[in-house]
Amino acid sequence: MSSSASKLIILDRDGVINEDSDAYVKSAAEWIPIPGSLEAIALLSQAGYQIAVATNQSGLARGLFTINDLHAMHQKMADLLSPLGGRVDSIFFCPHVDADRCDCRKPLPGLMRDIASRYRKNDSTMPLLGVPIVGDSLRDLEAATVLGATPHLVLTGKGQQTLDQGGLPTGTVVHTNLLAFTKCLLDTESVT
């Protein structure tokens, strides 16, 4: 990631950017940002990072919300980020349930391959080498590390439970939340 244009970060959504719910986040009204997460995305944007969100949204297949509801949630996120100077460049989502046997439902790497295809434009077997992936569950981290991404676990959402269960990918770095990850990343950049 040598030039500003090539800097990419992949974020999970529920439990990383916004509050998660075992009953699913089904509307823009239920989409509530985790304190500090929008500020973190703004800092990353201002530092020249492109931000891709990769999120499982099986509530679509379950009939819990519509594609228009999902777009409304993402529009709310964009509207809240804009005055902070932040933006999400792309959102990749899997609308399926496990029974659909798709390739895009994390921990399978389909969404990550799509992200790599859009941003990396190469045929490398490790097209996301060194790209940070930030998630709160093991499936988030596993989906990206198979393509070479660097795993970062946040303790928001299901993160503490994930940490307690163990079995994290080798090299996983643990952060309190997305803002702590961002500050760590940007502090490391300023040193190098």
Image (spheres, rainbow, N blue to C red):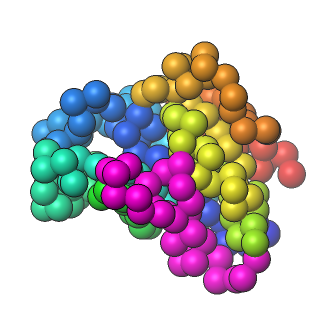
- Say left or right for 45 vs 186: left
Asked if one can make out residue 92 in the rendered structure from this viewpoint, the answer is yes
- Say left or right for 145 vs 191: left
- Residue 16: x %, y % from top left: 45, 37
Region in magenta? 97-124
68 in relation to 35, above or below: below
38 in relation to 121, above or below: above
Q: Residue at x 64, y 83 (%)?
A: 121
Asked if one can make out residue 186 in the rendered structure from this viewpoint, the answer is no
Could you tell me which quadrant the N terminus lies in? bottom right
- Say left or right for 101 vs 114: left
Q: Residue at x 65, y 39 (%)?
A: 152
Q: Nearer the viewer, residue 185 or 109?
A: 109
Q: Nearer the viewer, residue 141 or 78?
A: 141
- Residue 87: x %, y % from top left: 41, 60
Q: Residue at x 75, y 67 (%)?
A: 126
Residue 171 found in image quarter = top right
- Say left or right for 49 vs 82: right
Q: In the image, is residue 109 part of the stretch drawn in magenta?
A: yes
- Residue 26: x %, y % from top left: 17, 42
Q: In the image, is residue 119 part of the stretch drawn in magenta?
A: yes
- Residue 114: x %, y % from top left: 51, 72
Number of numbered discs: 0
Residue 123 found in image quarter = bottom right
Q: Residue at x 41, y 34 (%)?
A: 15
In the orientation shown, which residue stands out farthest toward the right? 192
144 in relation to 50, above or below: above
149 in relation to 38, above or below: below
